[in-house]
Image (spheres, coloured by chain):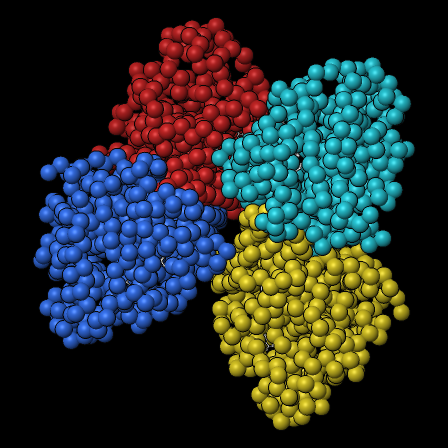
Chain colours: A yellow, B cyan, C red, D blue
Amino acid sequence: MSDEQRKVGVAVIGVGGAVATTAIAGVELLKVGACGTEGLPLADVTSLVPYTSLVFGGWDLDGDDLAKAAHLHGVLEPRVVEAAGAGLAAVSPWPAVADPEYCRNARGANVIPVSSVRGRVDHVRADLERFRIEHDLDRVVVVNLASTERWPDLTLPSLQTPEAFAAAVDADDPVISPSMVYAYAAILSDCPYVNFTPSASADIPALLELALQRDVPVSGKDGKTGQTMMKTVLAPAFRSRALHVDGWYSTNILGNRDGQILDDADSLSSKLQTKGTVLDSCLGYPVEDHVVRIDYYRPRGDEKEAWDNIDLTGFLGQRMQIKVDFLCRDSILAAPLVLELVRLSDEAARRGEGGAQEQLGFFFKAPITRDGSAPEHALYRQEQVLREWLAR
Amino acid sequence: MSDEQRKVGVAVIGVGGAVATTAIAGVELLKVGACGTEGLPLADVTSLVPYTSLVFGGWDLDGDDLAKAAHLHGVLEPRVVEAAGAGLAAVSPWPAVADPEYCRNARGANVIPVSSVRGRVDHVRADLERFRIEHDLDRVVVVNLASTERWPDLTLPSLQTPEAFAAAVDADDPVISPSMVYAYAAILSDCPYVNFTPSASADIPALLELALQRDVPVSGKDGKTGQTMMKTVLAPAFRSRALHVDGWYSTNILGNRDGQILDDADSLSSKLQTKGTVLDSCLGYPVEDHVVRIDYYRPRGDEKEAWDNIDLTGFLGQRMQIKVDFLCRDSILAAPLVLELVRLSDEAARRGEGGAQEQLGFFFKAPITRDGSAPEHALYRQEQVLREWLAR
Amino acid sequence: MSDEQRKVGVAVIGVGGAVATTAIAGVELLKVGACGTEGLPLADVTSLVPYTSLVFGGWDLDGDDLAKAAHLHGVLEPRVVEAAGAGLAAVSPWPAVADPEYCRNARGANVIPVSSVRGRVDHVRADLERFRIEHDLDRVVVVNLASTERWPDLTLPSLQTPEAFAAAVDADDPVISPSMVYAYAAILSDCPYVNFTPSASADIPALLELALQRDVPVSGKDGKTGQTMMKTVLAPAFRSRALHVDGWYSTNILGNRDGQILDDADSLSSKLQTKGTVLDSCLGYPVEDHVVRIDYYRPRGDEKEAWDNIDLTGFLGQRMQIKVDFLCRDSILAAPLVLELVRLSDEAARRGEGGAQEQLGFFFKAPITRDGSAPEHALYRQEQVLREWLAR
Amino acid sequence: MSDEQRKVGVAVIGVGGAVATTAIAGVELLKVGACGTEGLPLADVTSLVPYTSLVFGGWDLDGDDLAKAAHLHGVLEPRVVEAAGAGLAAVSPWPAVADPEYCRNARGANVIPVSSVRGRVDHVRADLERFRIEHDLDRVVVVNLASTERWPDLTLPSLQTPEAFAAAVDADDPVISPSMVYAYAAILSDCPYVNFTPSASADIPALLELALQRDVPVSGKDGKTGQTMMKTVLAPAFRSRALHVDGWYSTNILGNRDGQILDDADSLSSKLQTKGTVLDSCLGYPVEDHVVRIDYYRPRGDEKEAWDNIDLTGFLGQRMQIKVDFLCRDSILAAPLVLELVRLSDEAARRGEGGAQEQLGFFFKAPITRDGSAPEHALYRQEQVLREWLAR
Ligand SMILES: NC(=O)c1ccc[n+]([C@@H]2O[C@H](COP(=O)([O-])OP(=O)(O)OC[C@H]3O[C@@H](n4cnc5c(N)ncnc54)[C@H](O)[C@@H]3O)[C@@H](O)[C@H]2O)c1
Ligand SMILES: NC(=O)c1ccc[n+]([C@@H]2O[C@H](COP(=O)([O-])OP(=O)(O)OC[C@H]3O[C@@H](n4cnc5c(N)ncnc54)[C@H](O)[C@@H]3O)[C@@H](O)[C@H]2O)c1
Ligand SMILES: NC(=O)c1ccc[n+]([C@@H]2O[C@H](COP(=O)([O-])OP(=O)(O)OC[C@H]3O[C@@H](n4cnc5c(N)ncnc54)[C@H](O)[C@@H]3O)[C@@H](O)[C@H]2O)c1
Ligand SMILES: NC(=O)c1ccc[n+]([C@@H]2O[C@H](COP(=O)([O-])OP(=O)(O)OC[C@H]3O[C@@H](n4cnc5c(N)ncnc54)[C@H](O)[C@@H]3O)[C@@H](O)[C@H]2O)c1
Ligand code: NA
Ligand code: NA
């Protein structure tokens, strides 16, 4: 079957969110030729499934259809949302698996009325099967774009092996977070899984192992969009020029729902965790004065601002400073990466390559590795790895 | 003979300048262990001649010894200059080849009393020979760190072949600039030549050809230190993420002597020329609104400030902005690159590799290429080329 | 007659420009209650003629109706222009007095077919009279919002007295610029005159004297909106704290038609002139390193960016720096000031106060004074003078 | 007695701190003519006691002499400290009144061995008397420059009247903080008291009342130096131009001991409290999205950086942004204000004006008022009040 004829489903966790609706609106606009391919890093790679062959569905705590949701997020101007309108309005979120223990600030009524963990897993699997049949899909990729959950204790035995995990599911073990339920269901249903959030999900030993056993591609975590992306560009350059980084102060101000969620200390700590090690890895030594702040600040909405100050020491111990102010668009940077991850996950599945997808590190703040070793963070090296994989 | 025993001379054109005196002070401080290797990108490459085996001399319009010159430039605090004092004070600039037609703002009395161009070439060659013998040097590398000259007409026939050039020298052709005199003399004396300035020098067809014939390494031009270095780091990243650059506005404020020279429209145009094409090359398309300003502003002295604004378009045509403010130290960034270029030029000569040294593009704003084709500008790719060459 | 019933006409030179159409759209939106009074400094002063009692007309080189013009400028989103649509579409610019000698980059076909200077004056006066009668206006205020003209030689005898000026008009003396024609006609027709541009206009001795003789209020020049406004706020504070300003570097990037005009060196020099003395006046000493740049940079359109760097010396000679980045909206800042100037000029005329209106210095970069003495520039002192005048 | 002959003592709480040692070094340098009057706002006011007539002493937890302390703080270069050396070395801090309950991060061994609160008060008074006699002083002014204490419960009855306070002192009531002990002792000894810190000190009802009864000038609190000073300059200007402030995000990075103290949540909350209301007061309406961050960041030492982002709405609801980056010197900005406050407090005492000194609001983030009403915050209005008082 030719690429053009294949249809790939995208089941999004958090389908009513800012990033998800922006990605879906984008595909709708691409279908009608109302936008170009700016921001899509692999627009030139024709061996991947075309953007316009993607079919969207997914879960959300909020049951509003996506046209309504997109208007609310205000990422795109009203007339752009309207141009993408029919496609967006056609998607109504499925009831979600949720747990206030894991994400305090995310609230909504559209939840499945199932309380056992195993029952939730089965419910998600049934959603995926129904979606596949309804749209006659060749494959379904699951993407996590839900609100950031708090950080679990990853050393617990239940998370170490597939068997222990299955037992924990059956025992309604509270360590199993909603995003683990989704990931587990996806892997059992042979759906490639992409974790774009900082939550601990498929990247626990138990699920990585299961994905490998079942040959299901999984990737993550935490999309690398604004400030962290810039860090992985600048830090390698400072290293190239032997400029020593004495300190790096980063602050972010954002006023969208994601910012509101991160206003909760528990969710924030997950986010800061994925932002943390990037710098030391790119430089090859620890930066003691690396400070990262994320502040909820409403006037800016989705138009995040990331301000960085970098203190450098150069030749003869002389000091220098660099300030970077990135007036970015949070969801605009994220959405195209999500689309590429879907296409690439589909490609990995076609190639029969399961388990942790290291070649996708280009897209993530905290790339998962097969053997748990430290990942590559420098953007240009990540891109080379990806391009080589594509060329294989 | 072991590396440690070899002695490499560095004959600097503009030896009394800010960059030159900083580089020489650095080597003096390294000798006494008074500074580390911050800013020296190849400090780890032990196959190159050690920094402490370099011996300095050179020409300048200003005859003051280098300790005096260094105090005047104010790049380093008085006590640092004093720590490097004996070594600096020992160097007194040789009389220079100069021509106000080529550099209006550079004035000084320490000039050779020779008016024929051939006579000047011979004078420079005699300086090199005397320097080599006096210090018992294994090799002499010539580095151009003189003030930026105005741009000549590079299409003139005299500059196209070694023969035409030699004839022009004999005919006192006014197209022959001081920096061409130095470069010609260096090549005839089999001294590797590094052009760290934006002036047209060894990078004219006649001299590139001659260098190839005589197997003399030449490299240039215009050291890539602050703003342009950052451009060649950021632009490839924007390309990686498919963020379209709509415009890039760069302004520089600096108050050192180099800034004063660039206050002259003729010298400035040479500088802007080397800054120009970098961006389009890294991006793969022309940026119509690429503006570069250099303004002389005294309060800052050598502590240059480079402010950039970048306008980007991302997914769905949405606009973003990035501002970069680099509070840098002009000479502090430049001096270590000069030292590396000397060591690498020595290495190329040892390997018997003459002509344009493409693997040194990492250090230059406008790297010269063997066949005149467009050079690579992306910093990380340049570094890979260099590292591969080193590993050969 | 009550204030509410009075009708004040505003005859705008450059009525099709960005600032003019924004001001007029604003009044239309205020009429229908579609906007608030943000940006209008005197919204609380009820003794002035209401904004909604203003009636607009005027001259422009471009004959397009104002709805078309406003769409073209792109200052306001299409739906805002549409909301103000009927009122804008109703205004079609009158043929203009123009002279390419005075403003090279301003071109357009809508010009009066009169070549003698006296004939032009009479034509403008006839326009004013027709406008007054057509709309049954109680007064007409003339506001100059045309493109910046080049700087004339202000020492010429023809510009020193009303008599000499009248003779020059009759003699078609080329020193008489279009903006002088407009100003002369306004004063002769007893219309208060506001010069919001940097062009030399009513602020020449001959016309200031004439205005005083005829008791016509005149004010100017060059609206104080973005960077210069900030300068007159910050500089007095540095003085209050005895922080010495060693240098002040200002750059502006803008991409609207005004920016395009200022891309011409002649017009630019008029602009830089009005920007110049402000700083020294606020500080009480000359700042030698005061650099002001204005660069045409299209990606930004009307969304000007003004970046400032300030070098300060404080206690014990210690150095500090401040950077200010103003992402402003050129016409959005200017338009409400224009509306206040019209209301205040009307008030001055009602009070019978003619000649240079010093109390309006609050609005201008280069306030004209009655006796040619140096004006007050500090914003807060200007505001106090204005508020006292209003309270009189 | 002439001004030149009077001698005014300055008893500093925290005399070994960065601000104190900088102020004292300054006076020493002024004595020998080694520095100018930059940063001293009232250098021109000759009716005040000359800077060089000030004699310094004071308390600190750290017993090191001030030359040592100044070297440690690194505010001034070694050679400047040396130039001021004799005068600094001559001052050894007196044992301090301290309480870890009030300031966790401030530790030191130089404390008085007295545990009853009344005993501490008497000890401080004895220090003041000894200081006065030893140096034959005409007056002693007490200045609080100690580390910021945590915020006490100001509603407690013991803090409401002089009588209740005296009883609390006798009862060793734990609500009495060290800075209240110092303030109480100063007032009882008729020494004018200046609170340059954010701690609650003389600005409690009991002590304000006592100061009034005894005719002792008191002022405070929290010196207005960098970011807050700028706020009280910019906000009034936005109000003048009717630009609505939608949000104001402020972050501070600093690496001196003060920054380390503020790294403790309790001390920080006192600081944020004084920074808080300034903005709303200058604007006349509450800014909901006003965020203030202070982060300890070592690479910068005393060279604090304050970065602000301001979101504005102007005419027709259009949005603008301003960023201000202040690379300031914390102690360099503070020290001269301390010197002026001492001179002005002496002047108030000479005039016989006791109680809260409202005319000194110019120097403080949270000026105390006589009747507890909201203070004026706009810098220029504060300066006018001060200048009028001086001219009286
Ligand atoms: N640049 C970026 O925008 C970026 C970058 C990296 C990571 N992320 C992450 O992507 C995620 C989405 O960001 P966003 O801006 O779209 O956030 P958002 O708040 O707009 O959307 C999240 C959506 O998830 C839904 N949700 C929450 N819990 C759920 C659950 N258990 N099941 C199903 N739906 C659930 C919410 O109702 C909401 O609609 C966040 O975790 C964010 O941290 C975003
Ligand atoms: N970051 C950087 O500093 C940097 C980066 C790239 C290029 N450069 C270039 O390096 C050069 C040196 O920079 P600098 O800051 O040291 O400048 P500088 O002005 O301090 O030094 C230049 C020296 O050259 C001397 N000189 C001028 N003409 C000469 C001649 N004909 N012969 C011999 N000496 C001559 C001058 O007297 C002066 O001492 C400049 O061309 C500059 O553009 C500097
Ligand atoms: N913040 C601000 O926008 C600001 C501040 C201060 C001063 N100004 C000045 O205000 C003026 C208007 O600015 P703008 O942004 O609206 O510019 P614009 O270019 O949009 O408008 C100027 C208009 O004047 C017309 N014009 C030119 N010459 C004319 C003539 N001789 N007679 C009649 N019309 C003529 C042009 O056709 C154009 O429509 C400029 O001079 C500008 O420098 C603007
Ligand atoms: N720009 C500014 O620097 C600025 C502005 C406003 C307010 N302040 C305030 O001024 C104060 C001093 O600032 P700094 O930078 O000099 O701080 P610092 O930490 O350098 O000095 C404080 C000194 O107070 C001493 N100390 C602490 N508790 C004491 C006690 N109970 N008795 C006696 N001494 C004690 C410490 O040992 C230290 O030497 C701080 O409260 C700070 O918040 C400073
Ligand atoms: Na987001
Ligand atoms: Na304009």
Depth order, front residue of A222/C339? A222
Q: How many marks?
A: 0
Q: Percent position (x, y) of residue B300?
A: 51, 37
- For residue A134, above or below residue C58: below
Could you tell me which quadrant the N terminus of chain D lies in? top left
Q: Residue at x 66, y 54 (%)?
A: A239
C222 lies left or right of A110: left
- Location of the C terminus of chain D (image quadrant): top left
x, y percent for residue A283: 65, 59
- The residue depicted at 55 percent of the width and 43 percent of the height is B83
- Name the residue at 50% across, 8% down: C172
Residue A174 visible from this viewpoint? yes
**Image side of residue B136 versus residue C230, left or right:** right
Is residue B360 visible in the rendered image? The answer is no
Name the residue: 80% across, 50% down.
Answer: B2
| Residue A230 vertical placement versus D111 (above, below) | above
Does residue C330 appear to the left or right of B138 in the view shown? left
**Nearest the camera: D133 or C217?**
D133
Nearer to us in this view, A275 or D61: D61
On screen, D296 above or below B34?
Answer: below
Quadrant of the image where one finds ligand 4: bottom left
Quadrant position of residue A89: bottom right
Percent of width and height locating residue A319? 55, 48
